[in-house]
Amino acid sequence: MQSLIPALMIALGAYLIGSLSFAVIVARAMGLPDPRTFGSGNPGATNVLRTGKKAAAALTLLGDAAKGWLAVWLAGIVGAHFGAQILAVHLAAIAVFLGHLFPVFFGFKGGKGVATALGIMLALDPWMGLAVFATWLIVFVVSRISSLSALTAAVLAPVYGAYFTASRATVITLCVLTVLLLWRHRANIQRLLAGEEGRFAKPKQ
């Protein structure tokens, strides 16, 4: 019980970090339309890219991934001082992801969590995170479908977690993140099953 309260407080801080929606922040800073008002309405890097500003999309991607990494990293450091490192890290991983999905600072309308999940996984175990990213990249190169790449990587994440970390807590955390990510992509899943999901055009040679 003594370690639970600090862990919950750390998780609250992680949620607030996750609530920083970089798609909206970057769009405002660069004078772009609010990403929640056009395209898919999703405040994420892919939708920001629809403005034609690659730099804005890149900053969004980096910011969303960095906040996932930072929240978990800080949780490990602060949690260790209270003898609650493992609990704090895994609660923070879920909390920062929930913050991205339901940001308190932006009307609880957040993104789909792909970049933030990657940042979380890199913080939990760099090799696991790289394996997840490699999976995303391979599927994307073959299919040119961003959502399919994300869904495939998400489903395999707990498998990678078991292999690279052998940690039950990590695997459980990854299962929670996977379920949330699948739920957030439910419309994409329906379009994939119907063969209607959009593809990115291959770059010209």
Image (cartoon, rainbow, N blue to C red):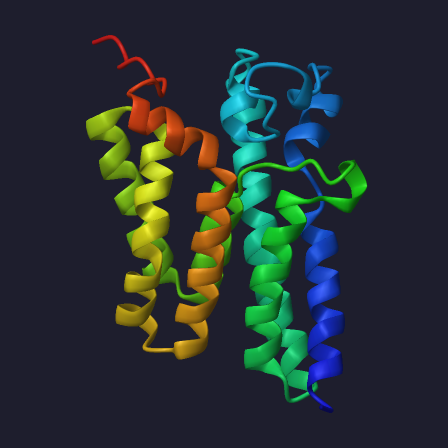
Examine the image and state in which quarter residue 6 appears: bottom right
Residue 19: x, y in percent?
71, 46
In the image: residue 18, left or right of residue 114? right
Residue 73: x, y in percent?
58, 65
Q: Nearer the viewer, residue 24 or 188?
A: 188
In the image: residue 93, left or right of residue 201? right
Q: Quadrant of the N terminus?
A: bottom right
Q: How many numbered badges does the structure rendering display?
A: 0
In the image: residue 194, left or right of residue 183? left
**Residue at 30%, 44% in the rendered image:** 152
Q: Quadrant of the C terminus?
A: top left
**Residue at 36%, 42% in the rendered image:** 151
Is residue 55 something one can see in this rendering? no
Residue 120's place in the image compared with 139, above or below, is: below
Residue 202: x, y in percent?
26, 15
Is residue 167 something one can see in this rendering? yes
In the image: residue 78, left or right of residue 107? left
Instruction: Name the outermost residue toward the top.
Output: 204
Examine the image and state in which quarter residue 10 appears: bottom right
